[in-house]
Image (cartoon, rainbow, N blue to C red):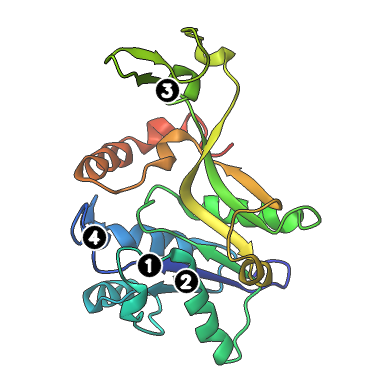
Amino acid sequence: MINGKFVLAVIPARGGSKGLPRKNILPLSGKPLIVWSIEAAKKSKYIDSCIVSTDDNVIAKVAESHGCEIPFIRPKHLARDKSATMDVILHALNFFSNKSIKYDYIVLLEPTSPLRDSDDIDIALNKLDKNRKKADSIVGVSRVESAHPVFDVKINKDGLIEPYIGKTFNVLRRQDIEELYFFEGSVYISDVEVLIRKGSFYHDRTMPYIVPRWKSLEIDEMVDLITAEAIISNLSLLEKGGAHD
């Protein structure tokens, strides 16, 4: 609870995954991938309930064994490759609403972002709650650096490169380019009523929660899992540079 408002965390974890089969329960530094998100939620000062929405009984058992609630098994039509995460979130909210259980804030924690921790969740919640006059949601973003559009090129019909932006090549130093950010996926938080009404975490009343580049890693391929292992092994070095902006 934060300032009298109840907080629900939802971790969506379907059984199917084409890029990295069974990735939600693959081991990462000694524990299943999904457990990193469960532990972050359980250590949060503000989250009242944490559930995993899954269609998979094995994932459900792993989540339960680590203290997470499985109030339902997700319907198959919400566990397909093209199923929208927002539909999964609304399904969970409807489940509790039908039981007359009300939450004020919802926190979406994708299990593919294991480097986000409880401090990220709590700082983002605090930031949103203190800024409700101008914002209804907050989402994780990270600064675009080497992939900034000014560094991008395209290949023309003659097989030669040309600038993606502008007509001439203008290679700038990183410190000279305009700051841009990308949606990095580690944390999404919204006022529940607004989320239901707008059907999105992204709108004109959305705040940024800025995370360092190393925390923005998402696990989609084996190389991401290997990279995450290396990052976790060197957390003390990375955290010296400041984990939160």
The first of marks 3 and 1 along the sequence is 1
Badge number at residue 87: 2
Mark number, residue 146: 3
| Image location of residue 129, percent across then percent down | 71, 59
Relative to 159, does residue 46 appear above or below in the rendering? below
Looking at the picture, which amino acid does disc 4 mark?
A: Ser
For the view shown, which residue lies furthest in the front direction? 157
The CA distance from mark 2 to mark 4 is 18 Å
Residue type of the residue flagged with mark 2: Asp
Image spot of residue 216 (x, y percent)? 43, 41
Identified by mark 3, the residue type is Ser
Query: 96 left or right of 58?
Result: right
Asked whether disc 2 touches disc 4, contact meaning CB atoms under 8 Å apart, the reply is no
| Residue 121 occupies quadrant | bottom right
* Label 4, label 3: how far apart the Cα atoms are: 29 Å
Residue holding disc 1: 83
